[in-house]
Image (cartoon, rainbow, N blue to C red):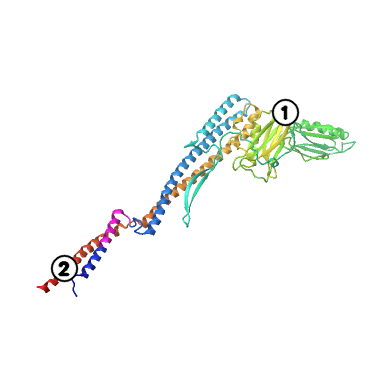
Amino acid sequence: MSSILTNRSAMVALQTLKSINSNLNTTQGEISTGLKVASAKDNSSIWAISKVMESDVKGYKGISESLGLGESTVAVARQGAETITDLLTDIKGKIVAAQEENVDRSKIQTDISTLRDQITSVVNAAQFNGLNLLKGTEDVNILSSLDRASDGSVTASNITISRQDMSTSAGALGTGTDLSANATLSAAAATNAGNTATITIATDADMSDNTMSISVGGATLSYSAGDLSGDQDAAASLVSGALNALGIVGVTASVSTNVITLTSTRAFEDVSLSSTGATASAATIAERAETLSFSGSANVAEGDGYQVTVGSNAFTYVAGKGETFEDVAKGLKAAVDGGTITDLSTQVTQNSSGQWQLKVDNDGASSQSLARAGAAGGTASGGLFGLDAVDVTTNAGADAALSNIETLISNSIDSAAEFGSAQGRIEIQSDFIGKLTDSLKTGIGTLIDADMEEASARLQALQVQQQLGVQSLSIANQSPQSILSLFR
């Protein structure tokens, strides 16, 4: 059946041509934009995923900039800490030179003061964009990543950089929890009196048949039968004189009837004692110094401060982040050594129970009272606390400076190492963020980029289809004309 009102062939040809033209427009759009998903109407789910990933890429670019800024800041701090280490090493060389008495210590002290001022200058200058990691104690966070969970929530991750306070500030004792129970004093005063032990010779009217051996501080006196004469008192007097004649450093002997009293004024060293043929009251004569012993079980928190008072002078050290009682003991030692009390010497040791101890010895004529205190919530002392008090113009000052400078060098080395480790971590994270960004871009391209080879081939095919569709429509439109022949 033919109809001049409804041309079904033309309708089919027209619909086909419209479809071809639509596909042709789509392909031309892919070629012109390079995208197979250019908008949400092309593929809403893929478009949404790509936009989320594109926002992450944009965020990672910001993170990369943050890491670059952080790396530069840490690099400046590391370089500053390394420079401080070198300067402290130079100061150590000056201190070692001052151990010799036949030198001009005042000129050496001038050199030390110059180097100390340079260290202060380095600490103040070691900043990047106003941020100085060599001053203060607060941590600095550097944005390192954006972590997206499966539910779409995003959290920021940071690399935490611990400041390393290289100042010489003394800190301030807090008013918080009383910590004095964590420190125990061996005595309420430090005197120059030595500690004693006795050797008792048994009563014997004739000592000529006796043998005897006495060892004091590694020096030994031996008596065979016939070496001694008279009674026990005479023997005790003879042995006492012989012990003094040995010239044992810091040890003197005195006698009362048959009892020999040994007195040791050694500050930081016990004196061993043993005997055969006589009775020793102890195996050792204890060191003269008094001790401030710190707890072997308690922890030290930032801001925990401890104070030792010698006479009328109070010396304080406040712990910084991550410090221990070893640091507290060494800090108090530096404080006491930098004080104005003459004939006072200190030493830091660890006893057999693992407790850190500050030993204080008084070689002056006057007794010095001792007291201790502790409190939380203070302002931490600087990592180079005690450097300002280095004074090599005296024998005692030179001796104290030699041990204290080792602590300061150790602190600066630890700080430089901490910054070096942090800088290495930032570099690794920065490299990872760069690779992660490239991977995300590749993934986005896989989702929405057009395959140009495929699009080109499809374009040519659609152009041929379009031409055929036009001809097909032309043929379909000509078919009603054949009906005219019926009316001729």
> Taking the image as drawn, is residue 104 in sight?
no
The secondary structure that most of the magenta stretch takes on is helix
Q: Is residue 130 left or right of residue 297?
A: left
Instruction: Work out whether residue 407 can be spotted.
Output: yes
The answer to which quarter of the image holds residue 20 is bottom left
Dot label at residue 364:
1
For label 1, count other residues whose C-alpha is less than 10 Å away and answer few (under 14), some (14-19) or many (20+): some
Residue at 54%, 29% (x, y): give it: 117
Does the magenta run of residues contain 238? Answer: no
- Distance from the alpha carbon under mark 2 to that under mark 1: 130 Å
Q: Quadrant of the C terminus?
A: bottom left
Q: Position of residue 210 (x, y in %)?
A: 85, 38
Residue 180, above or below 6: above
User: Horizontally, is 284 left or right of 57 in the view?
Assistant: right
Q: Which residue is mark 2?
A: 478
Mark 2 secondary-structure assignment: helix
Give the mark toward the camera: 2 or 1.
Answer: 2
Task: Give the image location of residue 284, x and y in percent.
Answer: 76, 39
Which corner quadrant of the image does residue 200 belong to?
top right
Q: Quadrant of the N terminus?
A: bottom left
Q: Nearer the viewer, residue 153 or 427?
A: 153
| Extent of the magenta region | 20-35
Q: In this rendering, would 488 be left or right of 214?
A: left
| Number of on-image labels | 2
- In this view, the residue in front, 333 or 483, is 483
Residue 307 image-quadrant placement: top right
Classify 227 as above or below 444.
Answer: above
At horizontal 62% and vertical 26% (from top left) the residue drawn is 393
> Where in the figure is residue 407, as x and y percent of width and height?
60, 37
Q: Amino acid at mark 2?
A: Gln
Question: Quick one: 442 or 19, which is closer to the camera?
Answer: 19
